[in-house]
């Protein structure tokens, strides 16, 4: 959000690109600045969907009303 991930070392860039906030920001920039459509931002949406599914599954597995 505040600075580009391009300034980080190459070794950590794949990890940073897999984070949900990075995917959301990249998709928003592509839509607002470049006029991209749904098909062009599908990879970023897939990352967000994966984070949603995984964290929801972990939450369902770990959280129990006592």
Image (tube, rainbow, N blue to C red):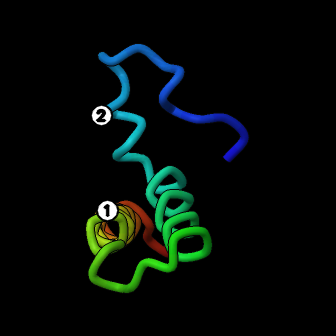
Residue 18 image position (x, y, % from top left): 34, 46
Q: Secondary structure at mark 1?
A: helix
Residue 5 visible in the displayed image: yes
Q: Residue furthest front?
A: 34
Mark 2 sits on what residue? 14
Q: Residue furthest right?
A: 2
Residue occupying image coordinates x 58% and y 35%? 4
Residue occupying image coordinates x 35% and y 64%? 44
- Does residue 1 sit above or below 31 in this rendering? above
Residue 66 visible in the displayed image: no
Residue occupying image coordinates x 44% and y 66%? 63
Instruction: In this rendered view, identify the residue nearer to me: 17 or 30.
Output: 30
Residue 57 lies in what quarter of the image? bottom left
Marks 1/2 in contact by CB < 8 Å: the verdict is no
Mark 1 sits on what residue? 47
How many numbered marks does the figure carry?
A: 2
């Amino acid at each position: 959000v505040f600075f580009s991930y391009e300034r980080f070392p190459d070794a950590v860039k794949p990890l940073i690109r897999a984070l949900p906030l990075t995917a959301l920001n990249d998709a928003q920039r592509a839509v607002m600045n470049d006029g991209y459509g749904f098909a062009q931002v599908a990879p970023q949406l897939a990352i967000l969907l994966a984070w949603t599914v995984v964290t929801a599954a972990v939450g369902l597995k770990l959280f129990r009303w006592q």
